[in-house]
């Protein structure tokens, strides 16, 4: 039996190593590669995607899984071997349905589409990306069709990112959350907006970079097993559990964009850095779902990083780093500024309360594109209409509209947006569970100490990698299924202090 497990692991490692070498090519493409490298890089990336896919869909893996199944069935559900067989089988059954030629076509298209977006966005040139987006939509539909039997064509894409979820379950959850959020947003934005002009002064890049690095080092991001570089649209990537990298962007006229995206990506990376080394190079060695992943980035970015306690400790340091800009700004004023609730255009820069409205709108647009109710050429107008309806503002151009972020230009249409709001919901639920276990966490954050919180998250969430599904993990860790109540308690508690919510 051990021999078969070793054989399986060695095959999985080979497939995984090729996939992660490909991830390195993507990291390079989005950080340092000169634009002249784009065409060759798209080709190289497509070849590696195809080979990794072929390795993972090798019938020998299917045979080994079949041989190991009776043994796995005799083991406890949460044993590492039982989990390895279970999760590998789920992944294997998925990949064998997708032809390698499709994977190569998708990869090559994605690289070209990303390149087109980086050029078209500054020029506000939607017609330049429209054909790429049309092809992306076609590829997304074709991908879904490899998994017949779905109720909505988005379901296979959603299931892959957030296992067990469907367009229907997510839509129901979002409707419930929207019903609670809209009155909170209305109430807050009907009053006086907080003044955040102190955040929009000139903050030189070097100072912002150094401050961000100091913060994430103290949160617990391990620079011996990672590094940070600059990019257009921040992301986290991994080449092994010993090398989990983050990227950020810094705007000198905006203090918050770089700072909070640095904390956000560090949250994703600490999750991956915390996975048990025993799972390296297997399907267990990665975060379990998009929603759980996002719960960690949002927990560190918002629940911790935008809390008053956090800044009680760090604000004096920030003020010392930028005395000319913040010397006259009180902690209270700064805290209100970084938590200003405003109906705005850009999702990634939006506040915690309105953020979910951006996500829900994108999720609905994805469903409409996929099921044919909306054509790509009509997307910019549909975008403006939905923003007007849901947020009361509409972008003057496509640069800050439909081309505002890399999504849809660097991956499927469908399957990625629900994770952001699931992540917010779960960040509230997980943090409440952490506080139940360790009430001292709140005071520790006020002293710039994060070891208790990080330790709890590692022991309860990170170490398990993909051993448990999102639904299993939430039940184990919090004692209940996914629920919006803790997240709403968190939002109400915080914003009631900042702005009285009736
Ligand atoms: Zn994220």
Image: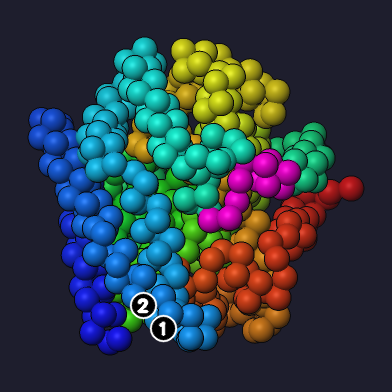
Within 10 angstroms of label 2, few (less than 14), some, or many (20 or more) residues?
Answer: some
Residue 377 position in % (x across, y down): 46, 12
Judged left or right of residue 253, residue 385 is right
Is the stretch drawn in magenta largely helix, strand or loop? Answer: helix
Q: Secondary structure at mark 1?
A: helix
Q: Is residue 44 above or below residue 86?
A: above
Residue 243 position in % (x across, y down): 25, 67
**Which residue appears farthest toward the right when viewing the image?**
502
Res. 68 mark: 2
Residue 254 position in % (x across, y down): 45, 41
Q: Secondary structure at mark 2?
A: helix
Q: Is residue 312 above or below residue 361?
A: below
**Is label 2 in contact with label 1 (beta carbons under 8 Å)?**
yes
Q: Residue at x 44, y 51 (%)?
A: 261
What segment is highlighted magenta in the picture? Answer: 163-173
Viewer-proximal residue, 488 or 50? 50
How are the residues colored?
rainbow
Viewer-proximal residue, 342 or 235? 235
| Residue that label 1 marks | 71
Q: Residue at x 57, y 40 (%)?
A: 150
User: How many numbered marks have been drawn onto this rendered protein structure?
Assistant: 2
């Amino acid at each position: 039996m051990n021999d078969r497990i070793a054989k399986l692991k060695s095959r999985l490692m080979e497939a995984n190593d090729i996939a992660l070498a490909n991830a390195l090519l993507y990291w390079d493409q989005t950080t340092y590669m000169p634009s002249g490298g784009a065409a060759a890089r798209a080709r190289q990336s497509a070849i590696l995607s195809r080979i990794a896919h072929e390795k993972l869909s090798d019938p020998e893996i299917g045979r080994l899984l079949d041989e190991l199944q009776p043994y796995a069935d005799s083991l406890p559900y949460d044993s590492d071997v039982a989990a390895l067989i279970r999760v590998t089988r789920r992944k294997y059954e998925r990949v064998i349905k997708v032809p390698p030629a499709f994977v190569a076509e998708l990869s090559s298209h994605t690289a070209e589409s990303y390149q087109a977006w980086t050029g078209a966005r500054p020029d506000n040139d939607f017609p330049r990306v429209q054909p790429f987006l049309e092809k992306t939509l076609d590829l997304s539909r074709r991908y879904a069709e490899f998994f017949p039997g779905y109720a909505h064509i988005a379901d296979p894409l959603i299931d892959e990112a957030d296992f067990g979820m469907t367009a229907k379950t997510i839509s129901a959850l979002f409707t419930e959350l929207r019903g609670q959020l809209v009155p909170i947003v209305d109430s807050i934005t009907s009053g006086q907006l907080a003044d955040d002009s102190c955040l929009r002064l000139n903050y030189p890049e070097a100072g912002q970079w150094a401050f961000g690095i100091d913060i994430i080092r103290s949160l617990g991001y391990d620079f011996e097993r990672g590094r940070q570089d600059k990019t257009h649209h921040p992301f986290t990537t991994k080449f092994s559990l010993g090398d989990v990298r983050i990227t950020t962007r810094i705007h000198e006229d905006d203090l918050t964009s770089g700072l909070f995206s640095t904390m956000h990506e560090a949250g994703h990376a600490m999750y991956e850095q915390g996975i048990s080394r025993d799972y390296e190079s297997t399907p267990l060695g990665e975060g379990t779902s998009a929603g759980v992943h996002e719960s960690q980035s949002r927990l560190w970015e918002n629940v911790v990083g935008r809390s008053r306690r956090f800044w009680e400790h760090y604000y004096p340091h920030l003020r010392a780093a930028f005395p000319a800009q913040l010397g006259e700004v009180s902690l209270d004023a700064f805290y209100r500024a970084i938590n200003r609730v405003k109906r705005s255009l850009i999702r990634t820069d939006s506040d915690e309360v309105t953020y979910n409205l951006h996500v829900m709108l994108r999720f609905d647009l994805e469903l409409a594109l996929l099921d044919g109710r909306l054509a790509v050429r009509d997307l910019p107008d549909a975008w403006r209409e939905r923003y007007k309806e849901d947020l009361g503002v509409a972008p003057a151009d496509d640069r800050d509209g439909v081309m505002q972020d890399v999504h849809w230009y660097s991956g499927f249409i469908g399957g990625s947006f629900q994770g952001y709001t699931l992540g917010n919901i779960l960040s509230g639920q997980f943090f409440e569970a952490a506080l139940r276990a360790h009430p001292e966490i709140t005071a520790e954050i006020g002293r710039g100490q994060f070891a208790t919180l990080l330790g709890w998250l590692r022991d309860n969430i990170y170490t398990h990698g993909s051993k448990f599904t999102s639904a299993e993990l939430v039940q184990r860790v919090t004692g209940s299924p996914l629920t919006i109540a803790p997240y709403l308690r968190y939002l109400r508690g915080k914003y009631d202090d900042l702005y009285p919510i009736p």
